Image: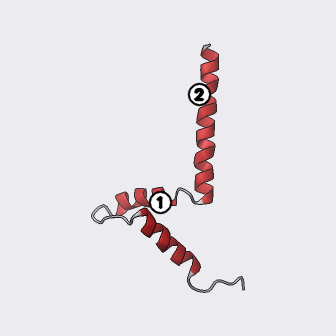
Amino acid sequence: MRGERATVLRLARALGAAWRWLRAASGDDAYERYLAHHVREHADRLPLSRRAFFRESQQRKWSGVSRCC
């Protein structure tokens, strides 16, 4: 019984780590990372809302020169 519980806990930790890696690799955790940075570096100012952060990141991504060469 104890061994099964330990196995389930290890599996849960591994799945959690895989999920965090996937979110980081895909950029899905960008807003959370932005908030953590904002608290550390700009605590005197209010952070952007999730919607404003996404809009700004999309503008930054798609404005300017967008060609391969």
Residue that numbered label 1 is attached to? 31
Q: Given the current orientation, which residue lies at the most extreme top position?
A: 1
Binning the other alpha carbons within 10 Å of mark 1 as few (below 14), some (14 to 19) or many (20 upward) gives some
**Image height check: is 69 above or below 50?**
below
Give x and y (percent) for residue 61.
57, 75
Quadrant in the picture for the C terminus: bottom right
Identify the amino acid type marked 2. Leu
Comparing 39 with 28, the one in front is 28
Q: Is residue 6 left or right of residue 38?
A: right
Identify the amino acid type marked 1. Tyr
Give x and y (percent) for residue 8.
62, 26
Q: Is residue 60 left or right of residue 35?
A: right
Give x and y (percent) for residue 6.
60, 22
Give x and y (percent) for residue 15.
63, 39
**Badges 1 and 2: C-beta atoms under 8 Å apart?**
no
Q: Given the current orientation, which residue lies at the most extreme right position?
A: 69
Q: Given the current orientation, which residue lies at the most extreme left position?
A: 44
Comparing 17 with 53, the one in front is 53
Q: Earlier in the sequence, mark 1 or mark 2?
A: 2
What residue do we see at 45% from left, 61% from top? 34
- Between the residue at mark 1 and the residue at mark 2, the CA separation in whole angstroms equals 28 Å
Q: Quadrant of residue 45?
A: bottom left
Q: Disc 2 on helix, strand or loop?
A: helix
**Image height check: is 4 above or below 39?**
above
**Image height check: is 58 above or below 24?**
below
Q: Disc 1 on helix, strand or loop?
A: helix
**Image height check: is 40 above or below 69?**
above
Residue that numbered label 2 is attached to? 9
